[in-house]
Amino acid sequence: MENLPEEAPGMMATAKTPHGAEAVFIGVSAGGMDALRRVLAPLPADFPAPVVVVQHLHASQGDFLAEYLGRLCALRVKEADDKDSLSPGVVYLAPPNYHLLVESDRSLSLSTDDKVNHSRPSIDVLFESAAAAYGPGAVAVVLTGASRDGAEGLRLIREQGGAAIVQDPATAEHAFMPQAALDCAGADHVLGLGDIGPKLVRLVTGRTVNGEAR
């Protein structure tokens, strides 16, 4: 699917630079393991931004996702720890049963506050904190899922001048979450999974990957 024009229904007009984004925030739920693999795989080892991920996981799943993704992408992948300082080229995953937030000093914090959208970790919680900490330097991505989590947070990201990428619902294993995000916030780019990673590279570095058009 081609990128939607800024005047498309549901879109909010915001000026974006073609590169220079400072951090990437990804929300994903049902069907997320393969979706994350495909989004992260194109990112080069020298990717100059941190990537912070909330994937809805059962508490018993532990650090399996970090091990799985770490074998399949060039970036370092780790489960986030409280007080971690965000570093470029590292993927931070929310631990099961903890909200993951970005603080004003751009470190991470963990919380056991009540569930939001029936979820802990909650994508909305991450996105809201990222909007406050990074403003126009944030890029938020909403992938496959079966809840509304992330829709309101994506709206806040866009209101602060950050960029929004939403997986094309027609390509998602579970279309409800990306569609809810589009209905609430619109997006700057609506893309299939194979195009999201290259788009992140261009937004952060200005470089093209695999012939991705400027």
Image: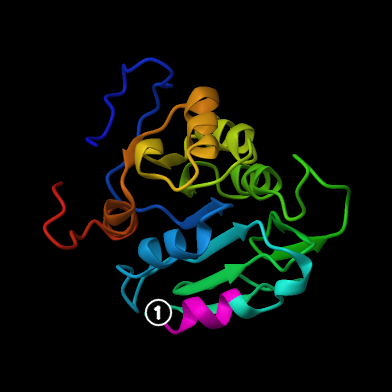
Q: Which residues are magenta?
A: 65-72
User: Is residue 154 toward the left or the right of residue 202 in the image?
Assistant: right
Observer-nearest of 171 and 20: 171
Q: Quadrant of residue 156?
A: top right
Q: Element under label 1? A: loop
Q: Position of residue 17 (x, y in %)?
A: 31, 41
Residue at 34 percent across and 70 percent down: it is: 41
The question of residue 71 being in magenta is answered with yes
Q: Residue 38 sits in which quadrant?
A: bottom left
Residue at coordinates 34% horizontally, 55% vertically from top-left?
200
As displayed, is residue 191 above or below residue 198?
A: above
The amino acid marked with disc number 1 is Leu
Residue 203 x, y percent position in the rendering: 32, 51
Q: Where 198 sits versus 17, above or below?
A: below
Q: How was the colour assigned to the protein in this rendering?
A: rainbow
Which residue is rendered at x = 35% and y = 79% of the image?
45
Q: Is residue 130 left or right of residue 175?
A: right
Name the residue at 45% across, 62% down.
36
Of 199 and 19, nearer the camera is 199
Of all residues, the one furthest to the front in this rendering is 173
Q: Is residue 52 left or right of residue 187?
A: right
Residue under label 1: 72
Q: Position of residue 31 (x, y in %)?
A: 51, 55
Tell me residue 206's x, y (percent): 24, 56
- The quadrant of the rendering that contains the N terminus is top left
Q: What secondary structure prevails in the magenta region?
A: helix
Residue 207 lies in the magenta-colored region:
no
Q: Is the residue 209 above or below the residue 146 in the image?
A: below
Count of numbered labels shown in the rendering = 1
For disc 1, the neighbor class at 10 Å (few under 14, some 14 to 19, many from 20) is few
